Amino acid sequence: MKRNIVIFLIVLLLFIAIALVGYLIFVLQDRMGIARRGDTESEVSSSRVDS
């Protein structure tokens, strides 16, 4: 019985760890995308002002 509980806890902790890593990757990708979008918008607006 105790062996089943230990296996369950290990699997649960691994699942939580993988979910957290995936969420962190998603957040970092999203922030980098916003930074890229912000750069392109500023480049477009500055080129409109010049012409």
Image: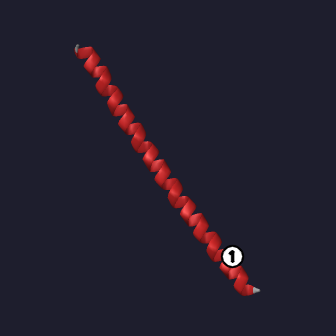
Query: What residue is pinned by disc 1?
Result: 8
The residue sitting at the right extreme is 1
Residue 46 place in picture, x, y as percent: 27, 21
Q: Quadrant of residue 42?
A: top left
Reply above or below: 39 against 7. above
Residue 30 place in picture, x, y as percent: 46, 44
Q: For numbered disc 1, what is the local secondary structure?
A: helix
In the image: residue 5, left or right of residue 37: right
Identity of the residue drawn at 22% across and 16% down:
50
Classify the position of the C terminus by image quarter: top left
Reply above or below: 7 against 48. below
Q: For the residue carrying disc 1, how many other residues have a C-alpha within 10 Å: few (<14), some (14-19), or many (20+)?
A: few
Residue 41 place in picture, x, y as percent: 35, 27
Amino acid marked by disc 1? Phe
Q: Quadrant of residue 8?
A: bottom right
In the image: residue 2, left or right of residue 15: right
The residue sitting at the left extreme is 50
Residue 11 place in picture, x, y as percent: 63, 73
Q: Quadrant of residue 5?
A: bottom right
Classify the position of the N terminus by image quarter: bottom right
